[in-house]
Image (cartoon, coloured by chain):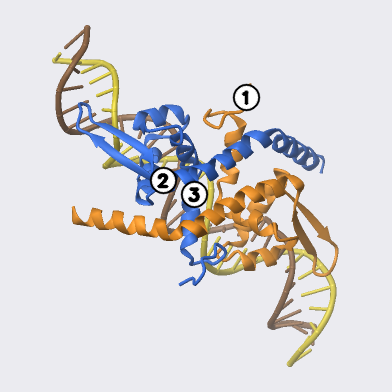
Chain colours: A blue, B orange, C brown, D yellow
Amino acid sequence: MCPAYDVYEDRCPTRLVLDRLADKWALLILDHLAEGTMRFNHLRRDIKGISQKVLSQTLKRLERDGLITRTVYPTVPVTVEYALTPLGRTLAQTAAALTHWAESNMDAILAAQAAYDAAGAER
Amino acid sequence: MCPAYDVYEDRCPTRLVLDRLADKWALLILDHLAEGTMRFNHLRRDIKGISQKVLSQTLKRLERDGLITRTVYPTVPVTVEYALTPLGRTLAQTAAALTHWAESNMDAILAAQAAYDAAGAER
DNA sequence: GAAACATGGTTTCCGTTAGATACTAAGGAG
DNA sequence: CTCCTTAGTATCTAACGGAAACCATGTTTC
């Protein structure tokens, strides 16, 4: 047991959570669901490049963690809606900070990579 | 090209960055380096459970992205120090938000998982 | 003089995972 | 009768991560 949770400890449960949060697709899904309730194929279309399997798996994990809700409507064909829980909404804000950081600092990173690769090529 | 960067676009470079940031080990390393300059084995000891290979690879990627610096001192045995760059420091703040979220919301997530698993077992 | 220890890695192997693709069920449109 | 939609599951393969061994180098120990 961890008296106080500590992500640096190997067996601390926070590690399990960090494993889940530190996932590109989970962050994108949470970030996107912050805009409102969405259906499976809607998410699949908007989050370009995600496969059906990974989307399905990631949604299931997020539901298990209590971050999103999954509501099935018995229409034909069946309709399934995903929405953030209050807990998920707090995390989505943090996730948004990460995606914003990425969008804001892209240029600096691309420049650093170019400089690094150029220095490496000279050797 | 993305006129404005957009993480939802498949080929946008922000996706590459998000891939890198959304990595458990990278987040922990950045978060830990925020406390100050550190050497290889120091990081390895503090971040419990990380393997040498993964630590080495992750440090290399972070250096290439311009987030950390790597300084070699020709002592015996050789000393290598890692430190955050100014860019890395801004990201470390965001990373800290994630690890803090994990530590703060552990209980809620564990409870959600238990409830989910209990409901699933009944079926 | 060989053996052990410290540093900061690289190499090798193996198992899990992710991604691509194809398929399912169940009704509606053409 | 065939194709379209919905929300997934099944299957196969390629890539990735972790464990452990190995490397170079110099100092200390036996």
Q: Is residue B61 visible?
A: no
Q: Label 3: chain?
A: A
Residue lying at 74% horizontally and 60% vertically, measured from the top left: B36
C-alpha separation, residue under disc 1 versus residue under disc 3 = 26 Å
User: Dot 3 surroundings within 10 Å: few (below 14), some, or many (20 or more)?
Assistant: many
Q: Quadrant of residue B34?
A: bottom right
Do the dots labelled 1 and 2 sit on one chain? Answer: no
Q: Quadrant of residue A50?
A: top left
Q: Is residue B10 left or right of residue B74?
A: left
Residue placed under numbered mark 1 in the picture? B4
Amino acid beneath label 3: Leu
Residue placed under numbered mark 3 in the picture? A21
Marks counted in the figure total: 3
Q: Is residue B64 left or right of residue A101?
A: right
The mark found on residue A86 in the picture is 2
Which tag, 2 or 3, sits closer to the chain's start? Answer: 3
Image quarter in which the C terminus of chain A is found: top right
